[in-house]
Amino acid sequence: MHPLTILSVFIAYSLTLFVIAAITGRKSNNKTYFTGNRNSPWYVVAYGMIGASLSGVTFISIPGEVGSSGFSYMVLVLGYLLGYAFIAGVLLPVYYGRKLTSIYTFLDERFGRVTYKTGALFFILSRSIGSSFRVFLVVNVLQVFVFDQWGIPFYVNVALFIGLILTYTFKGGIKTIVWTDTLQTTFMIAAVLVSAGIIYTELGFTPGSMIAAITESNYSSMFVMDINDKQFFLKQFLSGAFIAVVMTGLDQDMMQKNLTCRSLKDAKKNIYLMSWALVPVNLLFLSMGALLYIYAAQKGIQIPERTDDLFPQIALLHHGAFAGIVFLIGLVAAAYSSADGSLTALTTSFSIDILGLERNKNITEKQAGLTRKVVHIGFAFLIFFMILLFRAINDQSVINKLFTIAGYTYGPLLGLFSFGLFTRYKPNDKWVPVVALLSPALSYLLSQNSESLLNGYKFGFELLIINGGITFLGLMAISMPRIQQRN
């Protein structure tokens, strides 16, 4: 596909988002930016959150990972269902009952100001890293297939992309994102279906033979039975449950969309619909991965060194213009989905949790709006520089990096919220940051030495659970016997 065609598709999709932003951003204020005026239809939020949950990681990395991991990722997805049920049954009632804008305000009410800011800062760190990884994955494809052809440096590509996101989310915030996410979900799924359809036609499959080719291949293995393997099925299932809790239920980006629903009942319906929809959608992406490897083998296409490049390479170089355009729109949609909500959530958390805009009764609406806009721009620059840094150090599959780092940075949040929800103890507020920093450090040391200490056992995604458990025990060690109610 010609680079100019690719660039034209990118611009056309971006303009569509600007139109949506113009419509949703009318008569907007700070409340609109942070909460969407709590008036979003739950089914729109649910559909859009499918794309937000998938992101560029699922779109590109999951099909590529099938070559080495088979369908073992699907066990993780099944674990999500347990995690999302916990979110709907436990976390959403807490957030809605307190009418929270930032979910980390719960930590302030439960423990104190230092714990509150510690939790918010861990989210900011986690989301900044995760978003940068996801966006890098996609803009790197644009770099290879477009900007490198014209000799344009990578930083110009990233600056253009971040600048566009900054502009269309600047006014409407979360209200805009709830609606743009629906486009992103649609095109990400459409890209997979179109590519799968082309492979189906070119290889002369029937529905039955295609299913047989996938299930009888070496790529469809789902359950790993070796307990020492990182992908042991029980580890995967439990890790999936906890990953869903921390990366959705304890994540301001994902919860901010849920909190725009009109009621707790609607928010619960949103979570249940989205969680069950993720099962067939992720199975579709894994099946796509198996088809890509089967197709490459039959067509004599060399598997790229970076398996993240497999889907883009086949879609853009071997499937014709129409499939390439649809794939590209899905790719761009994945990148936007990864960055726009994160930028808004980071701005919300920093403005409310760190700067205290909601608590400051002396600040005017105009002053609060100006502060929020400055923070919004600041995080756009932060993500820009982190993407450049990630490109410099990238040396393994993004999916593994994302969840590995999440295991360290989301672990303290898991410990803090679980301690607040399931105990009546109150830790010494000033010592909480020490516990939150020691927990990931100890988890890392345990992970690096687990084979020698635990008879060959290797930690996978379940490191997140260990990290949260260490935080929980640390909080218990610095706690007073009973909660001292705050006035």
Image (cartoon, helix red, strand yellow):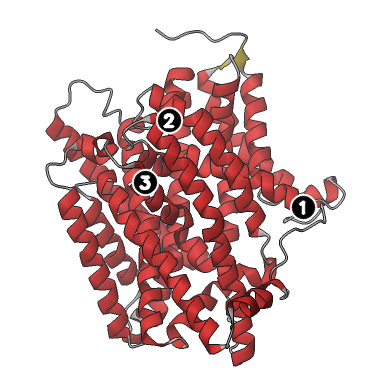
Q: Position of residue 133 (x, y in %)?
A: 47, 59
Determine which residue is flagged by label 3: 43
Nearest the viewer among 44 and 332 is 44
Quadrant of the rendered image containing residue 37: top left
User: Which is in the foreground here, disc 3 or disc 2?
Assistant: 3
| SS at mark 2 in the image | loop
Earlier residue among tags 1 and 2 = 2
Determine which residue is flagged by label 1: 458
Nearest the viewer among 76 and 440 is 76
Q: Position of residue 244 (x, y in %)?
A: 55, 44
Residue drawn at x 60%, y 52% as measured from the top left:
77
- Work out whether 299 lies above or below 163: below
| SS at mark 3 in the image | helix
Residue drawn at x 59%, y 31% as measured from the top left:
415
Q: What amino acid type is highlighted by mark number 1? A: Lys
Image quarter hosting the C terminus: top left
Determine which residue is flagged by label 2: 104
- Work out whether 340 lies above or below 3: above
Residue 410 visible: no
Q: What amino acid type is highlighted by mark number 2? A: Tyr
Q: Is residue 89 left or right of residue 99?
A: right
